[in-house]
Amino acid sequence: AVVSTQSGHYGRGLEVKYIPNDALNRLPIDTSSPQPWGNKRHVEVHYNLDEEPQHKADVPNAVLQTRALERISEHDADWVIYTDGSAEESTMNGGSAAVISDSIMGTSLHPHVVETIKRKGRPLTSSYEEEKAAMESAMTWVESNIHRTDCKSLCQTLCDPLFCTVMDLRHRMERALPEIVVQWIPAHVGIPGNELADKATKEACSLSGPPCSVSFMFSSIKYHIKQTIKDVEILHERTKIIYKNYKPKSDRKICITRADQSLLARLRSGHHLSFRAYKHRIDQTTNPHCLFCPGEDHNLEHWLTKCAQTTGARMRIFGTLDPSLQVLTTNPAGALELARETLLSAPEP
């Protein structure tokens, strides 16, 4: 399937270049839910090393390694299975692996590997899907063991028994005879078993022959398109500054209503009719100067950083009299509050 050329985002769909026709063979979206009754075991899932989680980047690798090895030992398992999955550019030609080690013959620092399971992934996939495939491979080998994985998002998803993408996997764990514990460990901090799984995964990506599954996940195809189509480089200097540290998730948390979304977008562009300099471009009869600062154009920069009218509100909301334009994206709630207090209620001449 080749995407045709047009302007804008639709035209940039051409950058996807090619989605295999096999992608039409999609796995059905599972909307079922597990039966609440039956003989189910409790499944422990830990997606942090400590009760008070810290960001991985804030902790030295040596500390992460020591704590992860301690966690593995604390569970006192008969078998330790390390799983890993990856994909080229996070969207293509994936692979997964599970490394089974015997805790009686070895230790977490010196694992005794008894078997390595490798699976060639789909042409269109995602790192998450391959991590899930690795854990599914491990489930066929489970016998009174503990399971280790470096995919934190998968561990977090497994904590929700109603999350449809891992519902079957969670159900299998609950029905299994042995006791199962899923423990996240940080990747690339020198955990021997995890390094072996990472090496096996890279080898699995290069396996010859057809992939283990010929059906594609809808989420994988969608993720591939999102990763491939990128926004063009911002050339406008002011816009580049404003969106330097932009995080869409922050907007979704703050902008509950469509009115908030619209107001924030107009503020960031400087194209709001309450900015007198902008309104002057549309209506020449409008005075472009600030009503409180004679001779100064009333535009975004003036309102946010210099205007006498907004001095007190700027100090109270942002903690400074001269906030950067980046507060429009780093502190969208503050920007909306300042606009409601000083811009939307500004007096007319």
Image (cartoon, rainbow, N blue to C red):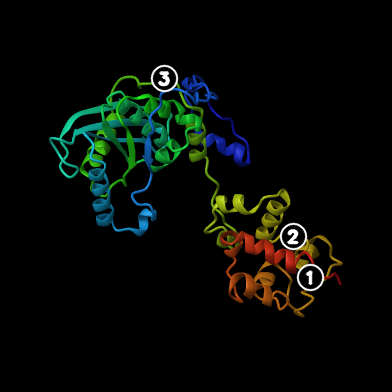
Question: Mark 2 or 3 closer to N-term?
Answer: 3
For the point 38% across and 39% down, which residue is it?
45
Q: As displayed, is residue 291 above or below residue 81?
A: below
The residue to which callout 2 is attached is 272
State how far apart marks 1 and 3 are (Cα): 63 Å
Q: As displayed, is residue 68 above or below residue 264?
A: above
For the point 22% across and 29% down, which residue is it?
116
Q: Secondary structure at mark 3?
A: loop
Mark 1 burial class by Cα count in 10 Å: few <14, some 14-19, many 20+: many
Q: Secondary structure at mark 2?
A: loop
For the point 70% across and 54% down, which residue is it?
260
Question: Mark 2 or 1 closer to N-term?
Answer: 2
244 and 281: which one is in front? 244
Residue 214 numbered mark, or none: 3
Mark 3 burial class by Cα count in 10 Å: few <14, some 14-19, many 20+: some
Q: Amino acid at mark 1?
A: Pro
State how far apart marks 2 and 3 are (Cα): 51 Å
Q: Secondary structure at mark 1?
A: loop
Asked where in the image residue 176 lies, by quadrant, the reply is top left
Q: As displayed, is residue 40 above or below residue 63?
A: above
The residue to which callout 1 is attached is 288
36 and 245: which one is in front? 36
Mark 2 burial class by Cα count in 10 Å: few <14, some 14-19, many 20+: many
Q: Amino acid at mark 3?
A: Val
